[in-house]
Amino acid sequence: MATYMISDGRATLCPPVRGELATDAAAVDAPIEPAESGTVKTGLLDVSVVLPCLNEEGSVGFCVTEALEAIARAGWSGEVVVVDNGSEDRSADLAVAAGARVVEEETRGYGAALLSGIRAARGSVIVMADADCTYPLDQLAKVAGPVLDGDAELVLASRLGAATRQSMPFLHRFVGTPVLTWLVRAGTGGTNVSDSQSGFRAFQRGLVDRLGLRATGMEFASEMLIRAAQRDVPITEVPLGYRSRIGESKLSTWRDGARHLRLIVRLSPHLLLWWPGLALALLGWMIFAATLADSTGASVGSLTWQPIFFGAILEVVGLTAAISGALFACHSPDVSQPTREAFSWVSNERSLRRVRWAGWALAVAGLAVDALLFGLWVSKAPFNVLAKLHLASLAQGSLLDGVLLVSAVGVYRMLLSAAPGRAAPEVRGPA
Protein backbone atom coordinates (compact mmCIF):
# COMPACT_ATOMS: atom_id res chain seq x y z
CA MET A 1 0.00 0.00 0.00
CA ALA A 2 1.08 3.60 -0.56
CA THR A 3 -0.27 7.09 0.06
CA TYR A 4 -0.36 10.31 -1.91
CA MET A 5 0.70 13.82 -1.00
CA ILE A 6 -0.05 16.96 -3.00
CA SER A 7 2.89 18.74 -4.63
CA ASP A 8 2.61 21.46 -7.29
CA GLY A 9 -1.04 20.66 -7.78
CA ARG A 10 -0.54 16.95 -8.41
CA ALA A 11 -0.75 13.85 -6.25
CA THR A 12 2.54 12.03 -5.81
CA LEU A 13 3.41 8.82 -4.03
CA CYS A 14 5.07 9.07 -0.64
CA PRO A 15 6.33 6.39 1.73
CA PRO A 16 4.24 5.38 4.76
CA VAL A 17 5.21 6.81 8.13
CA ARG A 18 5.82 4.33 10.95
CA GLY A 19 3.43 1.79 9.52
CA GLU A 20 0.58 4.30 9.23
CA LEU A 21 -0.55 5.79 5.95
CA ALA A 22 -0.35 9.55 5.29
CA THR A 23 -0.15 10.24 9.03
CA ASP A 24 2.42 12.67 10.34
CA ALA A 25 4.72 11.56 13.15
CA ALA A 26 3.29 14.02 15.65
CA ALA A 27 -0.21 12.69 15.08
CA VAL A 28 0.97 9.12 15.53
CA ASP A 29 2.46 9.90 18.93
CA ALA A 30 -0.32 12.25 20.04
CA PRO A 31 -2.38 11.10 23.02
CA ILE A 32 -6.01 10.21 22.48
CA GLU A 33 -8.29 12.87 23.87
CA PRO A 34 -10.58 11.75 26.67
CA ALA A 35 -14.08 10.94 25.50
CA GLU A 36 -17.08 12.88 26.67
CA SER A 37 -19.56 10.96 28.77
CA GLY A 38 -21.56 8.50 26.62
CA THR A 39 -19.39 8.91 23.54
CA VAL A 40 -16.98 6.56 21.80
CA LYS A 41 -13.45 7.93 21.38
CA THR A 42 -10.78 5.39 20.52
CA GLY A 43 -9.01 7.10 17.61
CA LEU A 44 -7.19 10.33 16.84
CA LEU A 45 -10.26 11.71 15.07
CA ASP A 46 -14.00 11.36 15.54
CA VAL A 47 -14.93 9.99 12.11
CA SER A 48 -13.12 8.44 9.13
CA VAL A 49 -15.09 8.03 5.90
CA VAL A 50 -13.61 5.22 3.78
CA LEU A 51 -14.43 5.22 0.06
CA PRO A 52 -13.20 2.38 -2.20
CA CYS A 53 -12.48 3.77 -5.64
CA LEU A 54 -11.89 2.28 -9.09
CA ASN A 55 -11.97 4.74 -11.99
CA GLU A 56 -14.40 7.20 -10.38
CA GLU A 57 -12.95 10.49 -11.62
CA GLY A 58 -16.43 11.78 -12.46
CA SER A 59 -17.69 11.52 -8.90
CA VAL A 60 -14.96 11.01 -6.30
CA GLY A 61 -14.21 14.70 -5.83
CA PHE A 62 -17.87 15.48 -5.16
CA CYS A 63 -18.16 12.57 -2.70
CA VAL A 64 -15.09 13.70 -0.75
CA THR A 65 -16.36 17.29 -0.56
CA GLU A 66 -19.85 16.17 0.48
CA ALA A 67 -18.46 13.96 3.26
CA LEU A 68 -16.07 16.62 4.59
CA GLU A 69 -18.84 19.22 4.64
CA ALA A 70 -21.12 16.80 6.53
CA ILE A 71 -18.38 16.16 9.11
CA ALA A 72 -17.86 19.91 9.55
CA ARG A 73 -21.61 20.58 9.96
CA ALA A 74 -21.78 17.94 12.69
CA GLY A 75 -18.92 19.61 14.54
CA TRP A 76 -16.71 16.51 14.41
CA SER A 77 -13.04 16.06 13.64
CA GLY A 78 -12.65 13.73 10.72
CA GLU A 79 -11.14 12.69 7.42
CA VAL A 80 -11.98 11.00 4.16
CA VAL A 81 -9.81 8.04 3.12
CA VAL A 82 -10.11 7.13 -0.55
CA VAL A 83 -8.74 3.68 -1.42
CA ASP A 84 -7.48 3.63 -4.99
CA ASN A 85 -8.01 0.05 -6.16
CA GLY A 86 -6.07 0.30 -9.41
CA SER A 87 -7.67 3.30 -11.10
CA GLU A 88 -6.41 4.18 -14.56
CA ASP A 89 -7.89 7.68 -14.57
CA ARG A 90 -7.39 10.82 -12.46
CA SER A 91 -9.38 9.56 -9.46
CA ALA A 92 -6.44 9.77 -7.02
CA ASP A 93 -5.48 13.30 -8.09
CA LEU A 94 -9.04 14.57 -7.80
CA ALA A 95 -9.58 12.90 -4.43
CA VAL A 96 -6.46 14.52 -2.95
CA ALA A 97 -7.39 17.88 -4.47
CA ALA A 98 -10.79 17.64 -2.74
CA GLY A 99 -9.13 17.04 0.64
CA ALA A 100 -8.93 13.25 0.99
CA ARG A 101 -6.08 11.00 1.99
CA VAL A 102 -5.54 8.39 -0.71
CA VAL A 103 -4.44 4.84 0.03
CA GLU A 104 -3.38 2.55 -2.79
CA GLU A 105 -4.48 -1.10 -2.57
CA GLU A 106 -3.16 -3.46 -5.24
CA THR A 107 -5.44 -6.41 -4.41
CA ARG A 108 -8.56 -5.92 -6.49
CA GLY A 109 -11.93 -6.20 -4.79
CA TYR A 110 -14.47 -4.22 -2.79
CA GLY A 111 -13.65 -5.98 0.47
CA ALA A 112 -9.90 -5.74 -0.04
CA ALA A 113 -10.17 -1.99 -0.64
CA LEU A 114 -12.34 -1.44 2.43
CA LEU A 115 -10.08 -3.48 4.71
CA SER A 116 -7.09 -1.48 3.53
CA GLY A 117 -8.87 1.83 4.10
CA ILE A 118 -10.14 0.80 7.53
CA ARG A 119 -6.60 -0.14 8.59
CA ALA A 120 -5.38 3.30 7.46
CA ALA A 121 -8.23 5.23 9.10
CA ARG A 122 -7.66 7.29 12.26
CA GLY A 123 -11.24 7.85 13.35
CA SER A 124 -13.03 6.42 16.37
CA VAL A 125 -15.95 5.66 14.06
CA ILE A 126 -15.52 4.26 10.56
CA VAL A 127 -18.05 5.12 7.88
CA MET A 128 -17.91 3.10 4.67
CA ALA A 129 -19.62 4.24 1.50
CA ASP A 130 -18.98 4.37 -2.26
CA ALA A 131 -17.24 6.98 -4.40
CA ASP A 132 -19.90 6.93 -7.15
CA CYS A 133 -22.38 9.43 -5.64
CA THR A 134 -25.05 6.78 -4.95
CA TYR A 135 -25.03 7.32 -1.16
CA PRO A 136 -26.17 10.69 0.26
CA LEU A 137 -23.05 11.54 2.23
CA ASP A 138 -24.62 14.84 3.23
CA GLN A 139 -26.69 12.73 5.68
CA LEU A 140 -23.56 11.25 7.25
CA ALA A 141 -24.60 12.34 10.75
CA LYS A 142 -27.66 10.03 10.69
CA VAL A 143 -25.38 7.03 10.17
CA ALA A 144 -22.31 7.93 12.21
CA GLY A 145 -23.99 9.88 15.02
CA PRO A 146 -25.53 6.92 16.90
CA VAL A 147 -22.18 5.09 16.88
CA LEU A 148 -20.16 8.11 17.96
CA ASP A 149 -22.65 8.81 20.77
CA GLY A 150 -22.34 5.23 22.01
CA ASP A 151 -25.96 4.34 21.18
CA ALA A 152 -25.08 1.76 18.51
CA GLU A 153 -22.16 -0.42 17.39
CA LEU A 154 -23.14 -0.94 13.77
CA VAL A 155 -25.52 1.27 11.78
CA LEU A 156 -26.75 0.30 8.33
CA ALA A 157 -28.38 2.76 5.91
CA SER A 158 -31.22 1.10 4.00
CA ARG A 159 -31.52 2.07 0.34
CA LEU A 160 -34.66 0.25 -0.79
CA GLY A 161 -37.30 2.75 0.32
CA ALA A 162 -35.80 5.50 -1.83
CA ALA A 163 -34.37 3.40 -4.69
CA THR A 164 -35.75 3.99 -8.19
CA ARG A 165 -35.45 2.26 -11.55
CA GLN A 166 -32.75 4.76 -12.43
CA SER A 167 -30.67 4.28 -9.26
CA MET A 168 -31.03 0.50 -8.85
CA PRO A 169 -31.61 -2.09 -11.61
CA PHE A 170 -34.86 -4.09 -11.38
CA LEU A 171 -33.02 -7.42 -10.93
CA HIS A 172 -30.95 -6.06 -8.03
CA ARG A 173 -33.84 -4.33 -6.28
CA PHE A 174 -36.51 -7.03 -6.50
CA VAL A 175 -34.50 -10.27 -6.81
CA GLY A 176 -30.82 -10.10 -5.84
CA THR A 177 -30.96 -7.85 -2.78
CA PRO A 178 -34.18 -9.36 -1.27
CA VAL A 179 -32.91 -12.94 -1.77
CA LEU A 180 -29.48 -12.22 -0.28
CA THR A 181 -31.10 -10.28 2.57
CA TRP A 182 -33.41 -13.22 3.32
CA LEU A 183 -30.45 -15.61 3.32
CA VAL A 184 -28.46 -13.33 5.62
CA ARG A 185 -31.42 -12.98 7.98
CA ALA A 186 -32.04 -16.72 8.00
CA GLY A 187 -28.35 -17.47 8.42
CA THR A 188 -28.13 -15.17 11.43
CA GLY A 189 -31.28 -16.40 13.15
CA GLY A 190 -33.50 -13.54 12.00
CA THR A 191 -31.40 -10.34 12.08
CA ASN A 192 -33.87 -7.53 11.48
CA VAL A 193 -32.40 -5.83 8.42
CA SER A 194 -34.19 -4.98 5.19
CA ASP A 195 -31.17 -4.20 2.99
CA SER A 196 -28.20 -6.43 3.72
CA GLN A 197 -26.30 -5.20 0.66
CA SER A 198 -26.19 -1.53 1.52
CA GLY A 199 -22.60 -0.28 1.51
CA PHE A 200 -23.33 2.82 3.60
CA ARG A 201 -22.49 1.82 7.18
CA ALA A 202 -20.91 3.15 10.36
CA PHE A 203 -19.25 1.14 13.11
CA GLN A 204 -16.73 1.37 15.92
CA ARG A 205 -13.15 1.21 14.67
CA GLY A 206 -12.32 -2.06 16.45
CA LEU A 207 -15.31 -3.96 15.09
CA VAL A 208 -13.63 -5.27 11.93
CA ASP A 209 -10.76 -6.83 13.87
CA ARG A 210 -13.17 -8.23 16.47
CA LEU A 211 -15.28 -9.88 13.76
CA GLY A 212 -12.25 -11.19 11.85
CA LEU A 213 -13.56 -10.03 8.45
CA ARG A 214 -11.62 -11.48 5.51
CA ALA A 215 -13.81 -11.29 2.39
CA THR A 216 -12.14 -9.41 -0.45
CA GLY A 217 -15.11 -9.03 -2.80
CA MET A 218 -18.66 -7.71 -2.68
CA GLU A 219 -19.53 -10.47 -0.19
CA PHE A 220 -17.78 -8.34 2.44
CA ALA A 221 -21.18 -6.72 3.10
CA SER A 222 -22.83 -10.04 3.96
CA GLU A 223 -19.85 -11.29 5.97
CA MET A 224 -19.96 -8.24 8.23
CA LEU A 225 -23.64 -8.74 9.09
CA ILE A 226 -23.45 -12.51 9.59
CA ARG A 227 -20.37 -12.35 11.80
CA ALA A 228 -21.82 -9.42 13.74
CA ALA A 229 -24.99 -11.38 14.43
CA GLN A 230 -22.96 -14.45 15.42
CA ARG A 231 -21.23 -12.34 18.08
CA ASP A 232 -24.44 -10.64 19.25
CA VAL A 233 -23.44 -7.22 17.92
CA PRO A 234 -26.64 -5.12 17.71
CA ILE A 235 -27.38 -3.85 14.20
CA THR A 236 -29.33 -0.60 13.77
CA GLU A 237 -30.91 0.27 10.44
CA VAL A 238 -31.87 3.78 9.30
CA PRO A 239 -33.71 4.58 6.04
CA LEU A 240 -31.78 6.90 3.72
CA GLY A 241 -31.85 7.83 0.07
CA TYR A 242 -30.10 6.23 -2.88
CA ARG A 243 -29.08 8.15 -5.98
CA SER A 244 -28.20 7.22 -9.54
CA ARG A 245 -24.54 6.42 -9.83
CA ILE A 246 -22.05 8.40 -11.88
CA GLY A 247 -19.83 6.28 -14.10
CA GLU A 248 -19.81 2.56 -14.86
CA SER A 249 -20.93 -0.01 -12.28
CA LYS A 250 -18.26 -2.45 -11.09
CA LEU A 251 -20.84 -4.97 -9.86
CA SER A 252 -21.00 -8.35 -11.64
CA THR A 253 -24.49 -9.70 -10.90
CA TRP A 254 -23.88 -13.43 -11.26
CA ARG A 255 -20.23 -13.63 -10.18
CA ASP A 256 -20.76 -11.50 -7.08
CA GLY A 257 -24.00 -13.34 -6.31
CA ALA A 258 -22.13 -16.65 -6.43
CA ARG A 259 -19.46 -15.26 -4.08
CA HIS A 260 -22.19 -14.28 -1.63
CA LEU A 261 -23.67 -17.79 -1.75
CA ARG A 262 -20.26 -19.39 -1.13
CA LEU A 263 -19.76 -17.12 1.85
CA ILE A 264 -23.17 -18.00 3.31
CA VAL A 265 -22.48 -21.71 2.82
CA ARG A 266 -19.25 -21.28 4.78
CA LEU A 267 -20.77 -19.23 7.58
CA SER A 268 -24.22 -20.89 7.74
CA PRO A 269 -23.94 -24.38 6.19
CA HIS A 270 -27.15 -25.53 7.86
CA LEU A 271 -29.05 -22.92 5.85
CA LEU A 272 -27.92 -23.85 2.33
CA LEU A 273 -26.79 -27.46 2.75
CA TRP A 274 -28.35 -29.31 5.72
CA TRP A 275 -32.02 -28.31 5.49
CA PRO A 276 -32.23 -28.10 1.66
CA GLY A 277 -30.40 -31.45 1.47
CA LEU A 278 -32.88 -33.14 3.79
CA ALA A 279 -35.74 -31.63 1.79
CA LEU A 280 -34.34 -32.96 -1.51
CA ALA A 281 -33.75 -36.43 -0.04
CA LEU A 282 -37.29 -36.54 1.35
CA LEU A 283 -38.73 -35.38 -1.97
CA GLY A 284 -36.76 -38.11 -3.75
CA TRP A 285 -38.19 -40.81 -1.49
CA MET A 286 -41.70 -39.37 -1.92
CA ILE A 287 -41.27 -39.67 -5.69
CA PHE A 288 -40.15 -43.27 -5.19
CA ALA A 289 -43.30 -44.03 -3.20
CA ALA A 290 -45.58 -42.30 -5.70
CA THR A 291 -44.15 -44.10 -8.73
CA LEU A 292 -44.28 -47.49 -7.03
CA ALA A 293 -47.96 -46.88 -6.31
CA ASP A 294 -48.60 -45.86 -9.93
CA SER A 295 -46.04 -47.13 -12.44
CA THR A 296 -47.67 -45.60 -15.53
CA GLY A 297 -45.52 -42.47 -15.34
CA ALA A 298 -46.43 -38.96 -16.47
CA SER A 299 -47.41 -38.14 -20.05
CA VAL A 300 -45.43 -35.31 -21.63
CA GLY A 301 -46.86 -34.90 -25.12
CA SER A 302 -46.19 -38.11 -27.00
CA LEU A 303 -43.65 -39.25 -24.39
CA THR A 304 -44.02 -40.87 -20.99
CA TRP A 305 -41.80 -39.55 -18.23
CA GLN A 306 -40.78 -41.93 -15.47
CA PRO A 307 -40.00 -39.61 -12.52
CA ILE A 308 -38.50 -42.42 -10.44
CA PHE A 309 -35.10 -41.78 -11.99
CA PHE A 310 -35.38 -38.11 -11.03
CA GLY A 311 -36.28 -39.23 -7.53
CA ALA A 312 -33.09 -41.30 -7.32
CA ILE A 313 -31.01 -38.29 -8.33
CA LEU A 314 -32.74 -36.02 -5.81
CA GLU A 315 -32.30 -38.30 -2.83
CA VAL A 316 -28.61 -38.99 -3.52
CA VAL A 317 -27.80 -35.30 -4.13
CA GLY A 318 -29.89 -34.30 -1.12
CA LEU A 319 -28.24 -36.77 1.20
CA THR A 320 -24.78 -35.67 0.03
CA ALA A 321 -25.65 -32.01 0.71
CA ALA A 322 -27.10 -32.83 4.14
CA ILE A 323 -23.99 -34.79 5.17
CA SER A 324 -21.73 -31.96 3.99
CA GLY A 325 -23.82 -29.38 5.82
CA ALA A 326 -23.76 -31.35 9.07
CA LEU A 327 -19.97 -31.79 8.95
CA PHE A 328 -19.40 -28.11 8.14
CA ALA A 329 -21.77 -26.98 10.89
CA CYS A 330 -20.06 -29.18 13.47
CA HIS A 331 -16.43 -28.42 12.64
CA SER A 332 -16.10 -25.21 10.63
CA PRO A 333 -14.46 -22.39 12.62
CA ASP A 334 -16.61 -19.90 10.70
CA VAL A 335 -20.01 -20.97 12.06
CA SER A 336 -21.55 -19.51 15.20
CA GLN A 337 -21.24 -21.27 18.53
CA PRO A 338 -25.00 -21.99 18.77
CA THR A 339 -24.93 -23.65 15.35
CA ARG A 340 -21.87 -25.70 16.26
CA GLU A 341 -23.56 -26.81 19.46
CA ALA A 342 -26.77 -27.72 17.60
CA PHE A 343 -24.75 -30.06 15.38
CA SER A 344 -22.53 -31.47 18.12
CA TRP A 345 -24.36 -34.79 17.65
CA VAL A 346 -22.30 -35.28 14.49
CA SER A 347 -19.23 -36.20 16.56
CA ASN A 348 -21.22 -38.21 19.09
CA GLU A 349 -20.35 -41.92 19.03
CA ARG A 350 -23.93 -43.04 19.39
CA SER A 351 -24.98 -40.88 16.44
CA LEU A 352 -22.16 -42.19 14.27
CA ARG A 353 -23.06 -45.76 15.09
CA ARG A 354 -26.72 -45.16 14.23
CA VAL A 355 -25.82 -43.51 10.92
CA ARG A 356 -23.52 -46.41 10.08
CA TRP A 357 -26.21 -49.00 10.86
CA ALA A 358 -28.77 -47.05 8.83
CA GLY A 359 -26.31 -47.08 5.92
CA TRP A 360 -25.80 -50.83 6.18
CA ALA A 361 -29.58 -51.38 6.35
CA LEU A 362 -30.16 -49.32 3.20
CA ALA A 363 -27.32 -51.05 1.35
CA VAL A 364 -28.56 -54.54 2.31
CA ALA A 365 -32.13 -53.60 1.33
CA GLY A 366 -30.91 -52.43 -2.07
CA LEU A 367 -28.93 -55.62 -2.60
CA ALA A 368 -31.95 -57.72 -1.57
CA VAL A 369 -34.16 -56.03 -4.17
CA ASP A 370 -31.44 -56.52 -6.79
CA ALA A 371 -31.24 -60.21 -5.85
CA LEU A 372 -35.02 -60.50 -6.19
CA LEU A 373 -34.95 -58.96 -9.64
CA PHE A 374 -32.07 -61.20 -10.67
CA GLY A 375 -34.04 -64.25 -9.52
CA LEU A 376 -37.07 -63.16 -11.52
CA TRP A 377 -34.91 -62.71 -14.59
CA VAL A 378 -33.26 -66.13 -14.23
CA SER A 379 -36.61 -67.88 -13.67
CA LYS A 380 -38.21 -65.94 -16.51
CA ALA A 381 -41.22 -65.40 -14.29
CA PRO A 382 -43.88 -63.06 -15.71
CA PHE A 383 -43.45 -59.59 -14.23
CA ASN A 384 -44.44 -56.12 -15.36
CA VAL A 385 -41.47 -54.47 -17.12
CA LEU A 386 -42.18 -51.05 -15.66
CA ALA A 387 -42.49 -52.53 -12.18
CA LYS A 388 -39.08 -54.14 -12.64
CA LEU A 389 -37.67 -50.80 -13.78
CA HIS A 390 -39.03 -49.00 -10.75
CA LEU A 391 -37.79 -51.65 -8.36
CA ALA A 392 -34.35 -51.52 -9.96
CA SER A 393 -34.22 -47.74 -9.53
CA LEU A 394 -35.36 -48.08 -5.92
CA ALA A 395 -32.65 -50.67 -5.28
CA GLN A 396 -30.04 -48.42 -6.88
CA GLY A 397 -31.05 -45.41 -4.78
CA SER A 398 -31.14 -47.43 -1.56
CA LEU A 399 -27.74 -48.98 -2.27
CA LEU A 400 -26.16 -45.63 -3.13
CA ASP A 401 -27.56 -43.99 0.00
CA GLY A 402 -26.30 -46.83 2.15
CA VAL A 403 -22.80 -46.76 0.67
CA LEU A 404 -22.76 -42.96 1.04
CA LEU A 405 -23.65 -43.07 4.74
CA VAL A 406 -21.23 -45.88 5.61
CA SER A 407 -18.43 -44.24 3.62
CA ALA A 408 -19.08 -40.84 5.22
CA VAL A 409 -18.81 -42.30 8.72
CA GLY A 410 -15.63 -44.19 7.79
CA VAL A 411 -13.92 -41.19 6.21
CA TYR A 412 -15.00 -38.97 9.11
CA ARG A 413 -13.43 -41.37 11.62
CA MET A 414 -10.18 -41.43 9.66
CA LEU A 415 -10.05 -37.63 9.50
CA LEU A 416 -10.66 -37.37 13.24
CA SER A 417 -7.97 -39.91 14.02
CA ALA A 418 -5.51 -38.09 11.73
CA ALA A 419 -6.21 -34.67 13.29
CA PRO A 420 -3.47 -33.55 15.71
CA GLY A 421 -4.52 -33.99 19.31
CA ARG A 422 -7.75 -35.78 18.47
CA ALA A 423 -8.65 -39.42 18.42
CA ALA A 424 -11.49 -41.15 16.67
CA PRO A 425 -14.58 -41.73 18.82
CA GLU A 426 -14.33 -44.96 20.75
CA VAL A 427 -16.28 -47.78 19.13
CA ARG A 428 -18.28 -50.09 21.38
CA GLY A 429 -20.39 -53.00 20.32
CA PRO A 430 -20.29 -54.98 17.09
CA ALA A 431 -18.50 -53.42 14.13
Image (tube, helix red, strand yellow):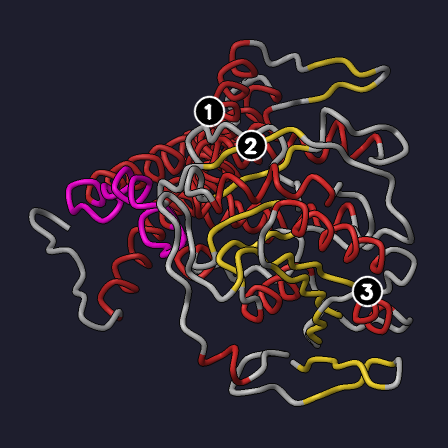
- The amino acid beneath tag 2 is Glu
Bounds of the magenta segment? 328-352
Q: Earlier in the sequence, mark 3 or mark 2?
A: 3
Question: x, y percentage for residue 166?
Answer: 90, 33
**Residue matched to label 1:** 282
Residue 196: quadrant of the picture: top right
Name the residue rendered at 83%, 59% in the picture.
Answer: 60
Q: CA distance from mark 3 to mark 1?
A: 60 Å
In magenta stretch: residue 342: yes
Crowding around mark 2 (Cα neighbors within 10 Å: few <14, some 14 to 19, many 20+) is: some
SS category of the residue bearing label 3: helix
For the residue marked with disc 3, what is the amino acid? Ala
Per the image, the residue denoted by label 3 is 98
Residue at 58% from the left image edge and 58% from the top image edge: 77
What residue is shown with label 2?
A: 237
Residue 378 horizontal side relative to residue 255, left or right: left
Q: Looking at the picture, tell me which residue is in the foreground, 76 or 385.
A: 76
Residue found at x 77% / y 58% = 64
* Amino acid on which the number 1 mark rests in the picture: Leu
Q: Earlier in the sequence, mark 2 or mark 1?
A: 2
Local secondary structure at mark 1: helix
Can you give x and y, in whole percent of width and height, for residue 323 in the image? 40, 44
Task: Estimate how packed mark 1 is, as few (under 14), some (14 to 19) or many (20 or more) residues with alpha carbons within 10 Å.
Answer: some
| In magenta stretch: residue 226 | no
Horizontal and vertical percent for residue 189?
A: 41, 31
Disc nearer the start of the sequence (3/1): 3
Residue 213 pos. (x, y %): 49, 59
Which of the numbered marks, if any, corresponds to residue 221? Answer: none
Image-based side of 387 in relation to 240, left or right: left
Q: Pick whichever, 143 or 358, lies toward us.
A: 143
Disc 3 + disc 1, Cβ < 8 Å: no
